[in-house]
Amino acid sequence: MPPLRPAPCPPARGCVRVLARASLGVQSGVGGRFPSVPRDGGAFDVFLPTTSLQFPRPVPDSEFIALCARVKLGFWRERGEHLKAFDDEINAFLDNMFGPRDSRVRGWFMLDSYLPTFFLTVIYLLSIWLGNKYMKNRPALSLRGILTSYNLGITLLSLYMLVELVLSSWEGGYNLQCQDLASAGEADIRVAKVLWWYYFSKLIEFLDTIFFVLRKKTSQITFLHVYHHASMFNIWWCVLNWIPCGQSFFGPTLNSFIHILMYSYYGLSVFPSMHKYLWWKKYLTQAQLVQFVLTITHTMSAVVKPCGFPFGCLIFQSSYMLTLVILFLNFYVQTYRKKPVKKDMEDPPAGKEVKNGFSKAYLTAANGVIGKKAQ
């Protein structure tokens, strides 16, 4: 009797033989790629227990699909286990560095694991790089309606956070010089909930850069812009996990106020009839610099007169804010000192654009100068 020959195998099913080889315990090296596939021969009973890979019959579609599904499930299960181990290592490292996390925020969305924040930041950075490549030979998008809605949404969210932070800190009797993490009771929880929205708003603001990419405003995607957006999202994940209230309330309160001004300006600049009312546009960068200086002053006041707020967090926050002061001050000098605003720039010619990291909307609004975008 002649030996059984393998059934004809279409190219799309070539993997069946390889996987069968792995499942039958043959040292083919494939098991290294699919270590979750059992090697005891009991994984898939649609094949005969032979190392010659001879099939007594063609594999039915249903068995083939079940086979591939089981292999894929095992493969992704193992990848998930590796990812979980990586997540555990990162969280253990952070816990050793910063100490125990605040139990009041356990279970809150995106806070228990650092991986979502990390991967979203990586996706953000990749989107800038890949997006610029994708848009290189394509026409810029206007996005006028989308940007109008976006600016309005960020303005309203900032207004909510400002009002809620002022009311909750007032309710808790917060001390402006130094406020600890546990003395205000329910007011601390209320502050923490608002600060979670502040953290999440930093994710939403990644769209600032994506809109630049889609509108081919590559000159706007400066180091300052990307550094500020990416770092704030990650830093505030740490803040929410270890210091979600107390002294942490001050910076977001100021920043929410500044964002109301900024995004209102960006939204209003969409409408040409509003330009004559935007005389205050040149002071937005100055307001941001004042915000950073006030935040550093407030932070260092807790160093001078401690109240139990973690000392290391105070030093880190002051150092980070100092980097923003330096970067924003450099931008301000480059924009307004070395190149003073001319009188005719109040109504610049069509197509003119100002380079900086914060312009938005249909008109390129640049912390002090509007350049009309040619349609």
Image: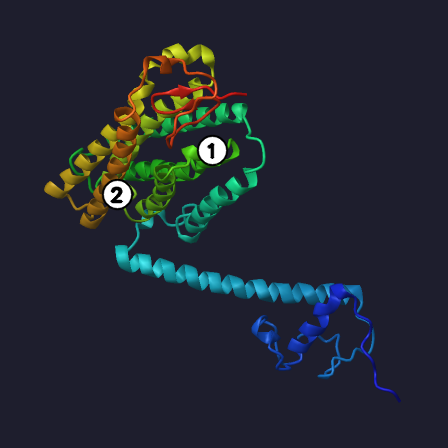
Residue matched to label 2: 320
Report crowding for label 1: few under 14, some 14 to 19, many 20 or more residues within 10 A (C-alpha).
Answer: many
Q: Residue at x 58, y 65 (%)?
A: 75
Instruction: Tell me which amino acid carries mark 1.
Output: Phe
Mark 1 or mark 2, which is nearer to you? 1
Left or right of 148, for residue 304? left
Left or right of 367, for residue 46? right
Left or right of 145, for residue 262? left
Instruction: Tell me which amino acid carries mark 2.
Output: Tyr
Q: Secondary structure at mark 2?
A: helix
For residue 210, above or below residue 1: above
Residue 246 seen in this snapshot: no
Mark 1–mark 2 Cα distance, whole angstroms, equals 25 Å
Q: What is the quadrant of the C terminus in the image?
A: top right
Where is residue 253? Give x, y as percent.
Answer: 29, 31
For residue 50, above or below residue 57: below
Residue matched to label 1: 212
Choose between 359 and 1: the one closer to the eye: 359
Residue 4 seen in this snapshot: yes
